[in-house]
Image: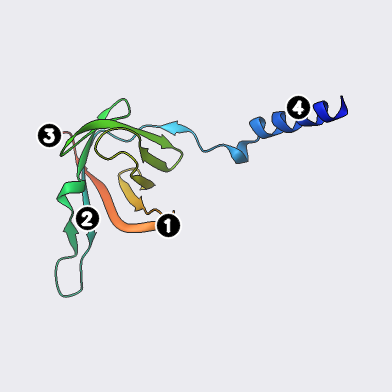
Amino acid sequence: MKKLSIALMTVAALTASPTLAQGRLGLLPQGDYVCALPGSADGSAWNEVEHANFSITGASSYKARHGAGTYLLEGRRLTFTRGPMKGMRMMRISSGMLQEVNKAGKLGRMRCHRAGPLTR
């Protein structure tokens, strides 16, 4: 009986702890997002990565070059959950700026910024 009550208290503490929460669910601003890699000192300031561009169309949905899908925004963490970009992860740097997160969980070099309202 004592083990059961300890187990129940542990479960209650874990589910109520805000430090274990992933973050509030959110939505990205609608519009077209342009992705780019940093350039060089003797060339362009940035180099667009056209195949990575996408549009946020609303209700956790996006459109990309090869189809549409859904995303999940938890706090600052963005994960594409369905569609052609499924599995890609990004970090929200500011309201209109995202930065890729690589497979090791570190920030990558590619950044995507909201370039304006939906045009597609």
**Which residue is drawn at the image coordinates 20% and 66% (left, top)?**
39
Question: Label 1 belongs to which residue?
Answer: 106
Give the image location of residue 18, x and y in percent: 61, 36
Question: Label 4 belongs to which residue?
Answer: 8
Give the image location of residue 98, x and y in percent: 33, 48
Query: Which image quarter is the C terminus in?
Result: top left
* Amino acid type, mark 2: Ala
* Amino acid type, mark 4: Leu
Question: Label 2 belongs to which residue?
Answer: 36
First in sequence: mark 3 vs mark 4: 4
Question: Label 3 belongs to which residue?
Answer: 119
Q: Secondary structure at mark 3?
A: loop
Q: Secondary structure at mark 1?
A: loop
First in sequence: mark 4 vs mark 2: 4
Q: Secondary structure at mark 4?
A: helix
Report which quarter residue 27 is drawn in.
top left
First in sequence: mark 2 vs mark 1: 2
Q: Is residue 114 left or right of residue 99?
A: left
**Which residue is drawn at the image coordinates 33% and 35% (left, top)?**
28
Alpha-carbon distance for marks 3 and 4? 52 Å
Q: Is residue 43 left or right of residue 86?
A: left
Give the image location of residue 20, x and y in percent: 60, 39
Alpha-carbon distance for marks 3 and 2? 19 Å
First in sequence: mark 3 vs mark 1: 1
* Amino acid type, mark 1: Lys
Q: Nearer the viewer, mark 3 or mark 2?
A: 2
Q: Nearer the viewer, mark 4 or mark 2?
A: 4
**Which residue is drawn at the image coordinates 17% and 47% (left, top)?**
51
Closer to the camera, 65 or 118? 65
| Contact? badges 4 and 1 (CB < 8 Å) | no
The image shows residue 15, relative to residue 89, as above or below, that is: above
